[in-house]
Image: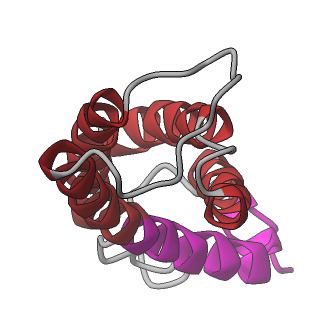
Amino acid sequence: MAQHTASTSHPRRSAWATGGTVFAGVLMMVTGVLGVLNGIAGIATNNVYARVDDYVYKFSLTGWGWIHLIVGALLALAGWAVLTGAAWGRAVGIALAALYMIEWFLFLPYAPVWALISIALGGFVIWSLATADRSGAGRDRTPPSAAR
């Protein structure tokens, strides 16, 4: 008689979650590097983006540059942690992806299309990291039948 365990009852979901976790780690690294580059551009010159006159969350573009630089660097590091299977990588990745989504929501008037894409990517990263198994993205897993 075959036994159904949590790891064997949903092999497709596990494969999707594992693939999604790897993809989320890569997305975090890529968007983090883009955030760093975006931040450097905002710090180096103050006219990279069109100015927005009346906006509640208005910062100088240099201020936005520093925000993008810091969040981008942290996001890239957390993405690396997710890919290497660090225990803290998923929790930090979820928190930073949420911060990333908030950052781009506040930056919406400056780059509306990219902000919407970034918010959607952040949502995918949160979903992927929250639904993945606890064993980590890049680790070798032994199937339950081979462990006997």
Q: Is residue 47 visible?
A: yes
Q: Is residue 137 visible?
A: no
Quadrant of residue 142 within the rendered picture: bottom left
Name the outermost residue toward the top. Answer: 56
Q: Position of residue 29 (x, y in %)?
A: 31, 65
Whether residue 4 appears in magenta in the rendering, the answer is yes
Q: Residue at x 46, y 55 (%)?
A: 49
Which of 65 and 5 lies nearest the eye of the viewer? 65
Q: Indicate left or right for 56 with 28 as reference.
A: right
Numbered-mark total: 0
Which of 14 and 32 lies nearest the eye of the viewer? 32
Q: Where 3 sits versus 63, above or below?
A: below
Q: Position of residue 148 (x, y in %)?
A: 44, 75
**Dominant SS in magenta:** helix
Which of 144 and 92 lies nearest the eye of the viewer? 92
Q: Residue at x 40, y 61 (%)?
A: 28
Q: Where 97 sits versus 24, above or below?
A: above
Whether residue 12 appears in magenta in the rendering, the answer is yes
Q: Position of residue 30 (x, y in %)?
A: 34, 71
What segment carries the magenta color? Answer: 1-27
The quadrant of the image that shows the N terminus is bottom right
Q: Indicate left or right for 29 with 44 as reference.
A: right
Q: Position of residue 23 (x, y in %)?
A: 49, 76
Q: Residue at x 64, y 55 (%)?
A: 115
Q: Residue at x 63, y 81 (%)?
A: 15
